[in-house]
Image (cartoon, rainbow, N blue to C red):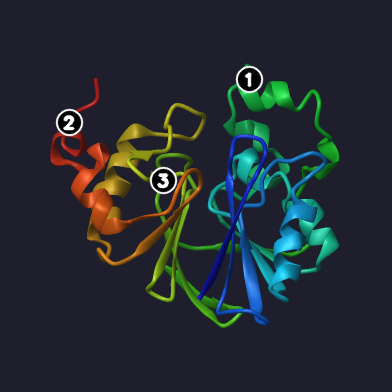
Amino acid sequence: MLVRQVVASYFETNCWIISRGQNQECIIVDPGIAQPNLVNRILEEVNRFNLKPKAIVVTHGHLDHTYSVLPLSKEISMRTYVSKPDRYLLKDPFAALLKDGGIQQLMKFLSRENIGEPSDVKELQDKESFEIAGLQITATLAPGHTAGSMLFEIEGEHLVSGDVLFAGSIGRTDLPTGSMQEMKKSLKNIILEMSDELNVLPGHGVQTRIAVEKRSNPYLQSDFLDSIED
């Protein structure tokens, strides 16, 4: 399987390009924020390996993961897959951001023309399995970072974790629709039940493995997961 990483210049969000190999169809996960958008950098990678994009996959609705969804879908006609709870954030990403946060300030200098829902959107349900670009994908709802955060297991080999799980850490839960209690449930009931062999492709930072995170990530240990919030 071919996995390519394009790191957006703002917030260092990982955009993943995943295919069965060169000269094949591919999916594009979480095209984030760049100036004017991330489209050209994505196309450079796509063209380098002679790939044919078939779908955009969104792990959650935060703007640093969705800013280039609309312009990319206009450049290449393809369907966008997103969870039902987070779909509205494609149109209104600011609904899940702090009013005085960094992205809100950044948008004073970036174009709002990139914000909006693409013409072809598929809402994903929890535990829905589907095939795109010859890849078998299972989507699992894992709320906590946002209400509609999703994990995508691909071919039983890779886990696209968005901002649910990072190498040695997890995503923040203090933004609108976030919840620490929901995050703990997702980590305990979903992440800890996953195969140790899964390679994790996170929304930020480096790749890791489920086995490594189970062993060393402080947020996957019982003293954290079983603690009670005040």
**Pointer 1 and pointer 3: residues touching (CB < 8 Å)?**
no
Location of mark 2 (residue)? 227
Residue 133 in the image: state x and y as whole percent.
61, 79
Up-down: is 59 above or below 147?
below
| Helix, strand or loop for disc 3 | loop
**Residue at figure coordinates x 80%, y 31% from the top left:** 110
Query: Which amino acid lies under the numbered mark 2 shown in the image of this protein?
Result: Ser
Q: Nearer the viewer, residue 186 or 27?
A: 27
Disc 3 marks a residue whose amino acid type is Val
Q: Is residue 12 visible?
A: yes
Report helix, strand or loop for mark 2.
loop
- Amino acid type, residue under disc 1 in the picture: Lys
Looking at the rendered image, the quarter that the C terminus falls into is: top left
Q: How many marks?
A: 3
**Mark 1 or mark 2, earlier in chain:** 1
Mark sitting earlier along the chain (3/2):
3
Specify whether 21 is left or right of 144.
right
Q: Read off the residue under disc 1.
A: 99
Q: Which residue is mark 3?
A: 164
Within-10-Å neighbours for mark 3: few <14, some 14–19, many 20+: many
Badge 2: few (under 14), some or many (20 or more) residues near its Cα, within 10 Å?
A: few
Badge 1 marks a residue whose secondary structure is: loop
Q: Are marks 1 and 2 in contact (CB under 8 Å)?
A: no
> Which residue corresponds to the image point at 71% horizontal and 67% vertical from the top-left?
46
Image location (x, y in percent) of residue 177: 49, 35
Sequence-first tag of 1 and 3: 1
